[in-house]
Structure formats: C-alpha cells, structure tokens
C-alpha cells in the first residue's frame, strides 16, 4: 500500500524488558508489495524499542508447529488428566484433518490423540484439549505432537517434555500457607527482576501438618500479570 495511506494493524505485542521472539505470518499478502511499520504504544515520548535480527523467510506450503503443551505437574489420581496443546499453522495454506497426540517420552507410547476436522487458517493458532490416563504412580515425561500428511517441516512438530508426577495412593498433599492472608510479595521465593537470585524459605513442622514422611515435591503458585515460561529454576530441599 501507499505509505501515505492508512495502515492496518497486523499484530499487537505486549512488551517486556527482555528479548523475545515475535512471529508475524503475512500469508494474506502473498504476491503483493507492502510497507511494514513498527509503532510503539507506550503512551509517551522519548520511549525506546529495540529491534534486532529482523528476518524475512519464505513460508512453506504446508507446515504445522507445536507451540505449547501445558498440564498438571502432579496428580493424586492418574485418570482423566487434561492437557492443553497449542498448534500453529506456519504455512500460507489453510490446513485441516491433522492429528494431535500425547506421548510418553520414555516409551514413545501414544497416550491420547484426536483428529481435528476444523480448518486452521494460515498464521492462526488453535488450542486443543486431550485427556489421558496414567494409572501407575511415578514420574512421567509427556510430549505433544502434531501430524499432517502434507506437513513439509518435521522439526517443529513436537513439544519439549512436560513432567507429571502421579502420586502414590498413600501420598498426601498439604498447603503450607494461609489462603485467606492479605499479605503478598512479588520477590519471594523467586525474584525475577534480577537475572539471578537466591532465597531461603523455612517451613516449620507445624506448617507441614504431618509428623514424619518423605517429601516427594513442592509446588509454588504465582499470580503474575505476565506468563513466565521456561524459567531456569532450581530448588533445594533440606531437613
């Protein structure tokens, strides 16, 4: 289009203080000359946005990628576990009749699968819910995979492993905080403002609610305004 004419908003990106990859599918503009503009919406002047490694690549005719896998970190009962799988159409053609699977990363056994009949337009994403059963106690590594007969790119069809711990029948889950407390903190036990942080949390015997036993794991809940994916966290537990 003419640079003097009005521009159409293609994508709005929520900014942060760290580098992040942003993909923009321009399949709808194939065969035409276009002008791209980067405009900040920071609400003021003298604001800076850093752009680096701007890359323009040709789109394949057919390509589905596995974008994200989420599910329970643990469960007391391994039946009817729900996992969310996000798939994106990275090509310039609409795609349908693709298969979404959940697999055991250790054995490659298919735990659940669904054939998607809905059309996924170029550049769009869709989230699918799959249910699987993990009847035996133990630690499982779950991966998701998307399959299509015409997919020409295979190295983006699978997710990273997601750990799910199925607890033993005699295991107990205890909450070591007061859900009704009004005090909050955004820097404990992990402070994400800095690149590195170390904290120590002490849980007293009366907070754990059982006199003896083996601690199989600990889970923290967060209520941040942004998703924090793939944070390299390390937790040490000592009596």
Image (spheres, rainbow, N blue to C red):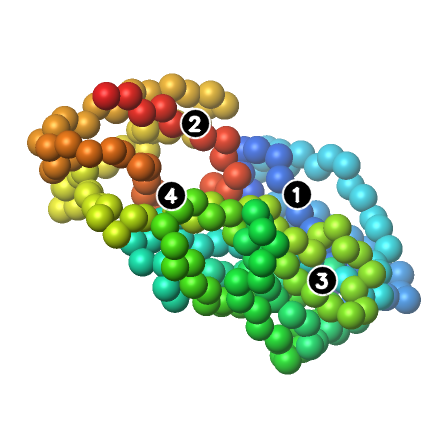
Q: What residue is shown with label 3?
A: 64
Whole-number angstrom distance, CA of label 2 to CA of label 4: 19 Å
x, y (%) of residue 16?
53, 38
Q: Nearer the viewer, mark 2 or mark 1?
A: 2
- The relative height of residue 91 versus residue 234 in the rendered view (above or below) is below
Q: Quadrant of the C terminus?
A: top left
Identify the residue under disc 4.
224
Residue at 23% from the left image edge and 36% from the top image edge: 184
Label 3: few (<14), some (14–19) or many (≥20) C-alpha neighbours in 10 Å: many
The answer to whether residue 224 shows anywhere in this view is yes
| Labelled disc at residue 234 | 2
Q: Residue at x 78, y 70 (%)?
A: 149
**What is the number of the mark on residue 21?**
1
Mark 4 and mark 1: Cα distance apart in space: 20 Å
Residue shown at the point (58%, 51%) measured from the top left = 107
Q: Tell me residue 73's x, y (percent).
A: 40, 48
- Residue neighbourhood size for the residue with mark 4, other residues' Cα within 10 Å, grouped as few (<14), some (14–19), many (≥20): few
Q: What SS does tag 1 mark? A: loop
Sooner in the amino-acid sequence: mark 1 or mark 3: 1
Report the front residue among 135 and 40.
Answer: 135
- Measure the alpha-carbon separation of dots 1 and 3: 18 Å
Q: Nearer the viewer, residue 41 or 149?
A: 149
Is 191 placed left or right of 128 in the picture? left
């Amino acid at each position: 289009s003419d640079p003097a004419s009005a521009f159409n908003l293609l994508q709005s990106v929520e900014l942060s203080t760290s580098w992040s990859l942003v993909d923009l599918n321009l399949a709808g503009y194939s065969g035409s000359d276009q002008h791209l503009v980067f405009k900040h919406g920071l609400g003021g002047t003298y604001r800076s946005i850093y752009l680096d490694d701007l890359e323009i690549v040709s789109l394949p005719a057919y390509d589905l990628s596995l974008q994200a896998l989420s599910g329970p970190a643990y469960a007391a009962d391994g039946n009817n576990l729900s996992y969310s799988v996000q798939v994106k159409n990275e090509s310039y053609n609409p795609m349908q009749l693709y298969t979404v699977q959940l697999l055991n990363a250790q054995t490659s056994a298919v735990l659940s699968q669904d054939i998607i009949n809905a059309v996924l337009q170029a550049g769009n994403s869709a989230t699918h819910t799959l249910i699987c059963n993990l009847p035996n106690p133990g630690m499982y590594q779950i991966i998701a995979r998307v399959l299509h007969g015409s997919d020409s790119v295979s190295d983006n069809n699978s997710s990273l492993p997601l750990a799910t711990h199925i607890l033993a029948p005699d295991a107990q889950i205890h909450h070591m905080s007061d859900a009704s407390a009004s005090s909050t903190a955004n820097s404990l036990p992990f402070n994400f403002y800095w690149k590195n942080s170390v904290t120590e949390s002490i849980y007293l015997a009366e907070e754990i609610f059982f006199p003896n036993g083996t601690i199989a794991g600990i889970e923290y809940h967060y209520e941040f305004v942004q998703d924090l994916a793939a944070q390299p966290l390390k937790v040490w537990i000592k009596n």
